[in-house]
Image (tube, grey):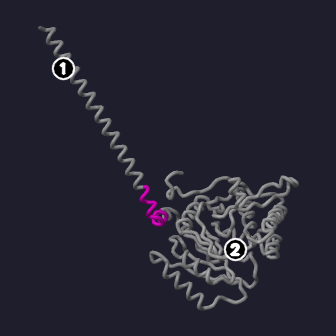
Amino acid sequence: MRRSLFNLNRRTAQRFKQLAMVSVGSVKIKLLLLCCIAFVLFLLAGRASVFNGEDAIGTSSNQFSDSRKGYAILINTWKRNDLLKQSISHYARCSSLDSIHIVWSEPDPPSESLKKFLNHVIQLNSKSGRRVELKFDINKEDSLNNRFKPIGDLKTDAVFSIDDDIIFPCSSVEFAFDVWRSAPDTMVGFVPRVHWIDQKGSADRYVYGGWWSVWWTGTYSMVLSKAAFFHKKYLDIYTNQMPASIREYVTRNRNCEDIAMSFLVANVTGAPPIWVKGKIFEIGSTGISSLGGHSEKRTVCVNRFAAEYRRMPLVSTTVKAVDSRDIWFW
């Protein structure tokens, strides 16, 4: 009798143990399903921020101190008022824009009608009640060095140097601005170029490589100032501390001011620039880069500036900044 009761209790205990194991297993399965659902919801929430575009970028902008909030656009132009109007009308929509400075080197001052039109489109296109300041920096001398003259009343640390004949989406500009704030001493831009040692010549001679050289090698050592962020301090260094012979060369040859700025920043930092992926829209006709002998002239500039610095300050890199919010796989 006792043995039968013992066997009954043993079977009952085993039954309860099996039921407990089943219930624990079902709980684990439910927890696993809940985790999967939570992960999917997290991915969907992250993807929703992509569709918010500039709002998502603008939110991150508020995490930085006031001294580095916002940027100034420094736009170079020459007798192309139609392109200037189109560019400023576009960039006035960018959420972190603080001011626009137009480098004016034409013999005649800007007309009142041009000023009135530009102020109107800025007021019309500025978002969230922002007041974007517009200024013409008038120069008596026609020199490419004018685009890098110091601006005394500049309120922001960041300067976005841009030509009047190219346009980038505001989302790309805002992303590049975020990248620059992570490395404010570095030059951050959209148009990469490269240099390398001339294999056919001496070890001290370099060759300038355009876009196709960058594309083929995946390497770059410059970002051109036609579309680049840099710290405002480099305006003063370029004008007052960089070897005067380099500025004289730029004025005399009407070329290579962008290479000169790349040399200057690399010489100060000892670091490479940062290339940011961005879609470029060219709204003007072809420039001097399409003329014959352009690469040869730029090669002369690279070697001339290296001789001035008595070394090669440019640093090559393969790093490229890509906004992961705009792509599914990265």
The residue positioned farthest toward the bottom in the image shown: 112
- The percent position of residue 95, horizontal first and vertical second, equals 50, 71
Q: Quadrant of residue 261?
A: bottom right
Q: Mark 2 points at which residue?
A: 286
Q: Main secondary structure of the magenta part?
A: helix
Asked which secondary structure carries label 2, the reply is loop
Quadrant where the N terminus sits is top left
The Cα–Cα distance between marks 2 and 1, rounded to whole angstroms, is 89 Å
Q: Relative to residue 15, is residue 131 depicted above or below?
A: below
Q: Give the residues drawn in magenta, as a range.
A: 46-59
Q: Name the residue under label 1.
A: 12
Q: Relative to residue 223, is residue 148 depicted above or below?
A: below
Instruction: Please report the residue visible at 64 percent of the width from the left and 72 percent of the height from the top.
Output: 162
- The percent position of residue 38, horizontal first and vertical second, equals 36, 47
Q: Which disc number belongs to residue 195?
A: none
The residue positioned farthest toward the right in the image shown: 202
Q: What residue type is labelled 2?
A: Thr
Q: Nearer the viewer, mark 2 or mark 1?
A: 2
Q: Relative to residue 217, is residue 145 depicted above or below?
A: below
- The percent position of residue 67, horizontal first and vertical second, equals 56, 68
Magenta stretch encompasses residue 53: yes
